[in-house]
Structure formats: C-alpha cells, structure tokens
Image (spheres, rainbow, N blue to C red):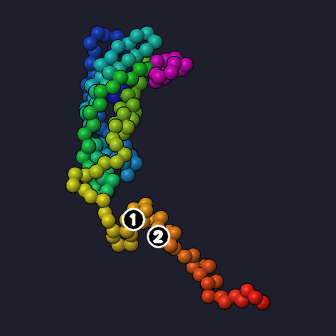
Amino acid sequence: MKISRFDFQKKDFKLEEDLDFSKETFDPTHIRGIKNTHVVVTGADYDDYLILNIKIKSDVIGVCSYTLEDVDYKVDISTSLTFTYNEDEEDTIHIDTPIFDLDPFILDLIVADVPLTLVKKGAKLPTSGNGYRVLTEEEYNQEQANKVDPRWAALDDIDIDEGE
C-alpha cells in the first residue's frame, strides 16, 4: 500500500485496500500465515508531520501452544502513526520521501497484536507421551535431589579402613 503525503493534504481523504501477505515468512511457532487483511487509512498532513489513522481487520493463522495445531485468530486494530522527515523527533517514524510503502508498518502491527500464547478451544496440556513426561517444578526438584551421579556411585562400594 503506497502512501503519498500529498493525498492527505485533501480534506477527508480516505484510502481503503485489501492487502496480501501470503508470501511473507513468519516465526512458525507464532504465526503460520495471514489469510486476508483489509486496511482503511485516513489522516492529515501538517507540514512537518503526517498523522495517519489506521484501521486493520485481518484473519491470522496462529499456532496452538498446547497442540501445535492451527488456530484462527481475528485481528482488529485501530491506531495512529506519526511520520516526519525530521530524524531528531522522538515518538515518530522517520521517512525520506513523500511517497512510501505502508505495508511493513501494517504487518508489524498485525504481528504485534497476535498473542505469543494461543490456545485452541478445547485443547489441554499433555500429561505424558512416548519418551517424555510432564512434571511440576516441585516434582522435578525432588527428583534432582534424590538423583545419584553414576560416576561417583562406584566409590560407594569401596571399603576404607580409617584406622590404618
């Protein structure tokens, strides 16, 4: 989605577009893909600043933290971003040209909105399986305290006379 600062000098200018993020790569343990994204952008240009009001509706395919299965997650974001040419300004996004691509900012907003821990409806944590078992922290600590190091276990069999 290309944005031109000059368009936002017009009163009540509105930009609406469906974006395709199907070719993007994501962290496979967080997001598997984005099905569709609809964006509405309004805003105003104030000489040094371009303030954009962005509304994003998107369908994301997340990953269940318990089962690693796909989870559908709806993203609904309303936010404002402030852009400027001035590199010294804080709390603003620096741009070099009056025409720029808004897609990376939209993608960042979507990814940031998806929780790191998603749980599919009805999913439960596994209790054990082939080659593993789930312990509480207390059970693990108790096992570690009772564990004998096999490298030193052979010394237990040696009979030492202390009187000689």
Q: Are there few (<14), some (14-19), or many (20+) residues within 10 Å of tag 1?
A: few
**SS at circle 1:** loop
**SS at circle 2:** helix
Position in image of residue 27 (x %, y %): 40, 48
Q: Is residue 29 above or below residue 162?
A: above
Number of the front mark, 1 or 2: 2
Q: Are marks 1 and 2 in contact (CB under 8 Å)?
A: yes
Q: Are there few (<14), some (14-19), or many (20+) residues within 10 Å of tag 2?
A: few
- Any mark on residue 152, and which? none
Residue 149 in sight: yes
**Which residues are drawn in magenta?**
84-97
Residue 61 lies in magenta, yes or no? no
Q: Is residue 73 left or right of residue 25?
A: left
Position in image of residue 16 (x %, y %): 25, 25
* Residue identified by numbered label 1: 135
Q: Residue at x 47, y 22 (%)?
A: 91
Q: What's the amino acid at mark 2?
A: Glu
* Residue identified by numbered label 2: 143
